[in-house]
Image (spheres, grey):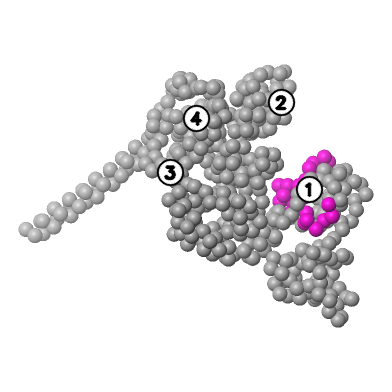
Amino acid sequence: MNALKTIITCCLLVLGLASHEISAQQSQSNYDYYPDLSYDLIADRLSCIESEIPLNFNEKVQSFVEYFTIRDREYTRQILQKKNVYFPLFEAELAKRGMPDELKYLSIVESGLNPNAISRVGAAGLWQFMPYTGNSFKLHQDWYIDERMDPVESTIAACKFLQQLYDMFNDWELALAAYNCGPGNVRKAIRRSGYKKTFWEIYRYLPRETRSYVPQYVAVIYALNYAEENNLVVDDPAYLPEYDTVLVSQYFHLETFCNQINLCVDDMLKLNPHIKRGALPENVKKFPLRIPVDLKDHIVENRTFLYDTASKVGKERLKYLARNTPGSTYGRERIVYRVRSGDVLGKIAERYHVRLSDLRKWNNIRGSMIRVGQRLNIWVLPTYNKNTRKLYASNNTNTPTPKKTTSNPPQNIKNGRFYQVKPGDTLWDISQMFENLTISKLKQLNNLTSNRIKPGQRLLIGSD
């Protein structure tokens, strides 16, 4: 009898597990299910939500609709989960300027709503501003901070840029195309088309990427507006927590600060994605640091202690990294050089006393190919004479030798002159401080077999 009971119990358990597995499979099946949509139905749905911006439907758009609703449903669900974090900001800024609300979807095409997205060509942030375009809209960029990644400032800049493009073309589809490839390429396509006036009329004359850009934009609008109809649902949408700001005018280590107020540093960085290195530099002035609103009173009351503690961690290490990270512009000033006939990238780097790897990084150059007329961003040390920089920038053929200054005078010793290495110094930095001193000479004078030096080390820089 007991044996029979055991057999029955085992059977029930097996049936229960099987039932649970079937239920899970059905749930997964329901999750992945998508309806079979006709061409006409999608066209009709788009016409129902079309407002100021045309939502033209054709086979190009249909292929992207299928991508977002069928082929990569998980990506679309991720977008749906994040949209409530940023859409309220986009909507408010667009409404303030009287611009079409549906422009908010453009950030999805640009960055997938990732404020820290960086493209292979150096575009960054929710709205993918290139460095030059970001500078033209006063988005600050340095080793520590990149306002292209600031949701608030970059959204304001994107709205201004889109409005400018619309004023140029008086057509939102062409403005969107120009946002992707630049107004010059759109004007060129218009000329080549025989001065047609709409995106689809000049479509074949646009760059390949731009031909896909507007169709993707239309498809994204469809996918998000008809998410439920396509079984694209999320159970836990994300929201941006309410925040306030405190002003910071000193070196400020975020993780140390967060530890003091019992806040996860990742949550702080979500509010401040434009802080790239987890710290603010010592030369920052009234930086508006975003903090959870419920911690504002506590931070204000304990401001002196919290700020002092956050100022004592990691400063020298970050300074060192800032000076030596490839492509860093920390402590440097930008000049723009126009390439002339006969120029070689290596020679330009040597002329301005910068590393070839840095010159490539600053200008997104993979090899050594440059072309006549190309503009190169070159970040030089402030020790260069201002008049010399002006001569360089004007491409004077008689390029003068930079005049060096001695910001750290050497200590006079009986048989020679020495320099004591400071935190963050490199051989290259030291060679720039004194006349007729090169890295090779420094290494020879001090019997160095590598470029490694350490703070406190005394280097012979010359004889009396």
**Considering the numbered disc 2 on the image, is that residue within a helix, a strand or a loop?**
helix
196 shown above or below 218: above
Looking at the picture, which amino acid does disc 4 mark?
Ile
Residue occupying the point 51% across, 22% down: 51
Lower sequence index among marks 4 and 2: 2
**Considering the numbered disc 3 on the image, is that residue within a helix, a strand or a loop?**
loop
Residue occupying the point 48% across, 36% down: 88
The residue where tag 4 is placed is 221
The residue where tag 3 is placed is 238
Left or right, residue 320 beside residue 427: left
Disc number for residue 177? none
Nearest to viewer (mark 2 / mark 1): 1
In the image, which residues are magenta?
358-386
The residue where tag 2 is placed is 187
Quadrant in the picture for residue 380: bottom right
- Mark 2–mark 1 distance (CA, rounded to whole Å): 29 Å
> Where is residue 225 drawn, in percent x and y?
44, 29
Looking at the picture, which amino acid does disc 1 mark?
Ile
Lower sequence index among marks 4 and 1: 4
The residue where tag 1 is placed is 335
> Where is residue 279 drawn, in percent x and y?
58, 57
Discs 2, 1 touching: Cβ within 8 Å: no
- Mark 4–mark 3 distance (CA, rounded to whole Å): 19 Å
